[in-house]
Image: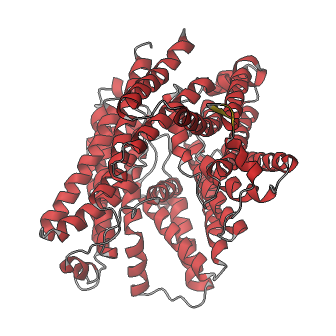
Amino acid sequence: MDRLAMFLPSVGASIVLIVIGQLIVPGFMSINNISSILMTTGLLGIMTIAQNTAIMSGNNGIDLSVGSVASLTAVVCPLLVSDTVGELLFAFLVAMLIGVAIGLMNSVGIQAFRIPPLIMTLIMGSVVDGAKLFVTKGSPATRISPILQSVSDPVIQPFRILTIFAVIMVVLAELMLHRSRFGRALLLTGDNPGAAAICGINTKLVGGAAYAISGGFAGIMGLFLAGYAGATTMSMGSSYTLLSVAAVAIGGTDLAGGKGSYVSCLVGALVLTVLTTILQALNVQEGVRLIVKGLILILIMVVNIYSHRRKS
Amino acid sequence: MRRPLSYYLRKLLKWSALPAFLLMAASFLIVKYLITGTNINASYITSFLNTNTAVICMSIGVTAVILTGGIDISLGALVSLCNVVAVQLMMHGVHYLPALIIVLLMAVAAGAVNGAVVSYLHVPPLLTTFATQTVFAGLALTVMRVPGGRIAGECTSFYYGKLFGFLPPTILFILVPVVIWKIYRRSPEGTRLYAVGCDEGKAFLSGINVERCRMFAYCFAGFCAGMGAIAYTFYVSAGDPDLGNSLDMRAISAAVIGGVSLSGGYGDVAGGIFGCLFFGMLTNMIVSFKVNVFTQNLLEALILLAGVLMAIAVRNRSMSLKGGLKREGQ
């Protein structure tokens, strides 16, 4: 019951937004539009796996370096792919490892030096941005190979390869959270690190692993982002940092840690994507679009908070 | 009453802003003695302050918010908004004094919106200010779509003139928030604000108006951002809807280097100021190293990381010496 209540705000908001979209945007429910919404949701969904893991690990956990990690892999990893599937898998692995390595550095700062996650990941983000400039000398990968771009090919309309991959990842993460020893340890550590330590959980190890996982998924997301966009710009991932935090919050994850669901966060990502799509279709100035987006975000947050507070 | 020297020494060692002060002093000394080609004189310091006033003001404001256990990432967008509003008002023939007052009032009102959503609607501060950041950025773009415009000539000549014949006028924009903060800190309300940051539940049970303390912190942050925006506007003499972007993260990092605890209740605005000065000196230092432009960002970020490591290590030590304060993040 408790887990169902977590879904309520995000599912409700997405239904309301889809109805609004259908009413005011012509062609909103066309197969192409749905397909592109689902795909963008999938991209943000991969990012929410990263962010949700970091936030659930508690200790005021948050990972503000995910956007920079994604930008780095988006700029660097497409260089590894020319035209074979093998190269794509290799690039995938490299992207993940880059992310995991950065995540591990975050873990060291947070667990060993007791730097608050917000600051550690924020500064790590600028270190990664600096490293990106250093490696690429300011010029991103110019050519994205067709094989990498094929992540946005449809399998069965409206589901594209990337959408299906993201859903599989989210389901696996959810199973990991509720069925595996590590998942339970993660939730318990986030909820009450003292109690977790008494239960024999190595809380530092679990907290550290959370940021490594977070970095890994951020790295994967960056590679797919490049494939999806078909071109790279220097900081194409940066806007996803706070978007992922918002999606995770809409998905009902407690920002204090210890409670959350990956599937619900995916629905949170859907809410944000549908919102953005509607606003883009509305053909208004960018400024007005941002204002409306911010106001709706506040509204969703307030509803979210109150639906949680009523129970407790 | 005379106290022994050791009393002041101990007090100095426990000062939350000490690591930031040392970092700042070290960076100044490095620039002064180890790097040839720069000589630190009055004009160097004036231009150094001019570039950093906005961040310093923002870090004063964000420190107050962090002391209550919150955070404010909307200040950068607020600076941009104040900047474009000020420029548009002056371009439309409004006299600069009323224009600046309107800008300041607007900044305080924006802070009040943040405060109200955080303290009365109970939305987590990070999410609230992310949403309001989007709104402020949107407003700024609506007010002015592309960079441009100019400000009244009196403002520029005031800013590049001298205060009482010797002080750079930019000091004024830092001094006003500091004085307001000091007065507030000395009042009973100031102690209450720290109490709210230390333990909200206990503060509430002791009869402290938690919401009012929060409201003050966010309004004060808005005011500081307004002051910073005015100084920055005078400095660049033009409007830009992206002016303040990314400054907020700089201000928050500076506040943390300055020794404020992100879980609230411990720290001082002086630390944030030292943190910003360290930051600014760091940038100057990296530029004067004459390294490859693509290496600069990486180098700066790495030194910053080292600075944070040091500041936090020192603070963790002094906090565990004190014992009474709660640890970071618990």
The colour scheme used here is secondary structure
Furthest residue to the top? A1
Between A4 and A190, the residue placed more toward the observer is: A4
Q: How many marks?
A: 0
Whether residue B126 sits left or right of residue B97 in the image: it is: right
Between B88 and B74, the residue placed more toward the observer is: B88
Between B329 and B104, the residue placed more toward the observer is: B104
Q: Position of residue B119 (x, y in %)?
A: 33, 33
Between B202 and B38, the residue placed more toward the observer is: B38
B218, above or below B18, in the image:
above
The quarter of the image holding the N terminus of chain A is top right
Whether residue A22 sits left or right of residue B30 in the image: it is: left
B36, above or below B309, in the image:
below
Residue visible at 70% across and 36% down in the picture: A161
Residue visible at 69% across and 24% down in the picture: A171
Q: Position of residue B173 (x, y in %)?
A: 29, 67
Q: Quadrant of residue A32?
A: top right
Residue visible at 49% across and 55% down in the picture: B249
Q: From this viewpoint, is residue B225 visible? A: no
The quarter of the image holding the C terminus of chain A is top left
Q: Quadrant of residue A17?
A: top left
Furthest residue to the bottom? B37
Q: From this viewpoint, is residue B267 visible? A: yes
Residue visible at 67% across and 42% down in the picture: A152
Q: Position of residue A246 (x, y in %)?
A: 49, 37
B207, above or below B103, in the image:
above
Q: Position of residue A129 (x, y in %)?
A: 63, 60
